[in-house]
Amino acid sequence: MKTVDWIVVGGGITGAALAYELAKKGFSVLLLEQHASLQGASRFSYGGLAYWAATTPLTRQMCADGIDRYRTLAAELDADIQLRELDLLLTVAAKDDLEAVAAAYAHVVTPPKLLSVADACVLEPLLNPAAIAGALTVKHGHIHPEKATQGYTQAFIRAGGAMQLAQVVGLLREGKQIRGVITATETYYSANVVICAGGMSRHFLKSAGIPIRLYFTHAEIVETPPVAVQLSTLVMPAQTQRFLLEAESSTPKFEQLWDEPGHEPVPPILDAGAIQFIDGSIRIGQLSRVLTNPDAKIDSMRSETALRTSIGQVLPTLRNLPGTWHHCLVGFSPDRLPLIGAIPDFEGIHVFSGFSNPLAIIPPLAQRFANWATGQEDEIIAQLSPNRDSLSSKTGD
């Protein structure tokens, strides 16, 4: 019976990055991923790197580390991750108070600049001026998340790691000890298991009787093929509802519902935004639903209509572009910070998940986790631990 040092469950960007960093440290690592091609949040992400949005000493440090890591990552992985800087345009709806919306961003490390309607339309000519009261703008990092994930995976294999395409169906538990992973075809043994499965992370842990305050939304987008239309900016609403949705649905009053499929604790939201990748394709989104069943069925035609109608109000040219509706799960925690490290009261089981938005901080945190796994103490990993006393008291968020 072969036992590896680490099994990493989930081959998206979180799992691929962590598996790579662990392999670099000399651990024997097995990366398990269900799909031959990406299907989850790493596949359908906008790819944004919001370094500018840090608000606390903890998030500022993580974002600064992220900038430094991304600057050298492509060369280290020998992969074109398409790192670039874009103008982010945060639109303010015509009915809203422009100054009040701008004031809400005063506490971030790089507050966005306020734009009039005319100036916003100069920056993004495709905007509908009648739909906005103005906008905010700031420089925003961007990568191609699929290419970054592929780069990490290939570098992991070159570093001696092993990857298997396998559907994980459970964890091998003996009392309080996790000794491996059960797939649809066989059992893999390890000294440590780390769950990096995004929106499915809660499911894997709960199925083994391991409680954790990690949740998920059903996220929906429309993706176009490469098109002639040219977006000049990354467009998002200044008043993003998604984080409010996550905060409300993860309050203690809904905890019991999360363990019962078939519930929708709070209504869905739609944040109308769009990003164009270097190849000319556009991702239009995002509709987010809190459905406690990870396999819940969604009316794709109705959702696509809602997405197209919403973006059509802000960017009319995009409304009728050819495109395909997609859906994935996005994991999140109650305080918008990921859960990282050993799960309390159990041995051999860890988590590296809950990155609902901060793609910018995954690479440096993967490095920190790998260093921590060698026995080094790390203050940031401690603050992100599932064992933190409160999900907010130590971070100030």
Image (cartoon, rainbow, N blue to C red):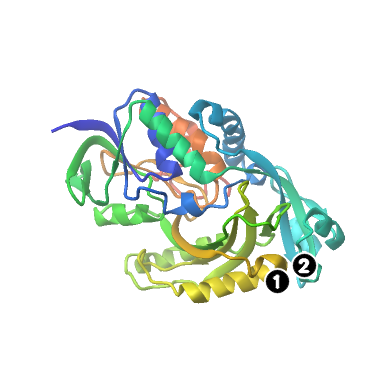
Q: Position of residue 146 (x, y in %)?
A: 49, 45
Which of the two labelled residues, at mark 1 and mark 2, occupies the earlier sequence position? 2
Could you say which quadrant of the image residue 27 lies in? top left
**Compared to 187, does 329 lie above or below?**
below
The residue shown at (65%, 69%) is: 319
Please state the horizontal and vertical placement of residue 199, each as a whole percent of the image. 41, 55
Residue drawn at point x = 53 percent, y = 52 percent: 45
Amino acid of disc 1: Gln
Name the residue carrying label 1. 313
The amino acid pointed to by label 2 is: Asn
Q: Position of residue 306 (x, y in %)?
A: 58, 74
Viewer-closest of 396 and 350? 350
Instruction: Return the residue nearer the eye: 200 or 395.
Output: 200
- In which image quadrant can residue 18 be found? top left
Q: Secondary structure at mark 2?
A: loop
- Extreme-top residue of the structure: 26
Q: Is residue 77 above or below residue 45?
A: above
Residue picked out by circle 2: 128
Asked if residue 284 lies left or right of residue 155, the reply is right
> Where is the N terminus found, in terms of image quarters?
top left
For this rendering, which residue is in front, 110 or 164?
A: 164
Residue 369, compared with residue 49, is above or below; it is: above
From the viewer's side, name the closer residue of 147 and 256.
Answer: 147
Mark 1 touches mark 2? (CB < 8 Å) = yes
Q: CA distance from mark 1 to mark 2?
A: 7 Å
Q: Which residue is pictured at 25% across the width and 39% down the height?
A: 347
Identify the residue at image location x=67%, y=43%.
Answer: 52
Horizontal arrangement in the rendering, residue 315 relative to residue 130 (left or right): left
